[in-house]
Amino acid sequence: MTRSTYPQYLNRCGWNALLPARENIRPLDGDRHVSLAVIGAGYTGLGAARRWAELEPSDDIAIVDSSQLGEGNPGRNSGFLLEIALANDADPTQMARMSECNRLIGATMRKLCGLVADHEIDCELERAGTYRAAAGDAGRRALASYEQFLERAGLPWERLDRDQLESRLGTRFYAEGLYSPHCYLAQPAALIRGLADALPPSVTIYESTPALSIEPLQTGWRVRTPAGALACDRLVLANNAFTKQLGVGRSRLVAMYTYAGLTAPLPARVLGTLGRVENWGLLPAHRLGSTLRRTRDGRLLIRSHYGYERETDNGRIAARLADGLRRRYPQLQKVAFEHVWAGATGFTFNGSPIWGEHAPGLFVSSGCNGGGVVKGTLFGELLADLAAGRAVPDMRRLFGNASWMPPEPIRELGFRIISGLERRQGRAEM
Ligand SMILES: Cc1cc2nc3c(=O)[nH]c(=O)nc-3n(C[C@H](O)[C@H](O)[C@H](O)COP(=O)(O)OP(=O)(O)OC[C@H]3O[C@@H](n4cnc5c(N)ncnc54)[C@H](O)[C@@H]3O)c2cc1C
């Protein structure tokens, strides 16, 4: 089956629906030549464009995105900006390497905070920290391993039992948890829109402009889009799960869809039962578990479930998400979601990215593995450094290199077997 070269979602992005509609959406119409072209206006693509503009201020830069700012994938996440490794990445046996990764990610987070402050980006950014919690045995084992990582890294955390979690978050669902301060929460659609608006004038973003194909020229590359083409000296692919549709990472990348449901602001009488913390985020200790958030305006968000390479019917998903919320908050029997949506993330077998110069003049960063707001920004910036011939950290040593996967249909079968086993182990966390 031929798949589209870009994501097309069934439902609107809930975070974006809360913001005013944007005007002056500009698709690419006709042909242009630029020094640097970027495919994908996500955290990675904007990071690459912003850094290139810093290094080469007189160069013209163009970004094409199939979606509109805020509506596409970068606006669809849960809004956790992690300053340290995710539980699934954190390896307590590799502390020197992990500390170096954390140092780079932390420095990138400080830059993002600087951009938000300098450009007065209204995206509700707050260092709320993050809870990680487990309901069953598999989750508790993952939590213990993450605690070991935090301890070895000398990072602060607080261990919480069921009663303490209930007093803060209003749920007795979790047997135990950890709170650590190294995480910001934000409204992701507002964040990506603001970051795009903060780019210098040398960068033009063409929205609603999917890249249909790329091809090498005698010098440089050409990107074909529905109503025109971009020729460029250097090309950056920052379109995450969809680089493989443009020919890069076919044997190393899959698109995994995951889903979020966001309630309307809950009435004060319900909020009164949801614990004393008003703005918080909880990540699952087990990788197939659910993410939860309570927002400042009194909404609850739940993110859960995965779909292999295609989006599942959102009605079925909404029912499952509602069930997950009710199991955590039995008092919410009648609560419905205001918005339910999907987002596609690029997954690799070993959790490492595809990063580097793929062919002369063609630079790629893809395979975010579900945690790429801050890391994507870092990878995009470093890709611009690499493209400019500057020294970059040893990315393979620090973050690894996406490993090979067997072709279809074995790949999908393998995925279904592994995820089925993991789901059984981690079903208490869903
Ligand atoms: C529901 C959900 C919750 C998540 N929660 C979190 C979280 O809390 N924290 C976190 O760090 N990460 C989270 N993630 C993952 C996070 O969204 C990604 O890691 C992050 O967005 C990656 O950034 P990126 O710029 O590399 O890629 P993306 O954000 O995927 O951006 C790629 C861009 O490329 C565009 N594109 C794709 N194909 C084409 C094409 N052919 N032509 C033109 N444009 C194209 C897309 O429209 C998109 O705008 C979540 C993901 C989902 C789906």
Image: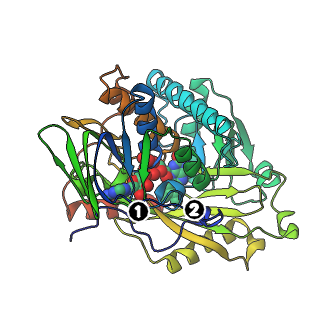
Residue pushed farthest left? 218
Q: Decide: is 21 above or below 10.
A: above
Please state the horizontal and vertical placement of residue 107, each as a whole percent of the image. Answer: 55, 27
* Residue visible at 47% across and 38% down in the picture: 377
Residue 287 seen anywhere in this rendered image of the structure: no
Circle 2: is it few (<14), some (14-19), or many (20+) Cα within 10 Å?
A: few
- Is 205 left, or right, of 145 in this rendering? left
Please state the horizontal and vertical placement of residue 351, each as a whole percent of the image. Answer: 38, 44
Quarter of the image where one finds residue 52: top left
Q: Amino acid at mark 1?
A: Ser
Can you tell which mark lies on residue 22?
2
What residue sits right under mark 1 in the picture?
A: 208
Quarter of the image where one finds residue 402: top left
Q: Amino acid at mark 2?
A: Arg
- Is 360 left, or right, of 100 in this rendering? left
Query: Which quadrant is home to the N terminus?
Result: bottom left
Q: CA distance from mark 2 to mark 1?
A: 13 Å
Q: Decide: is 339 above or below 126.
A: below
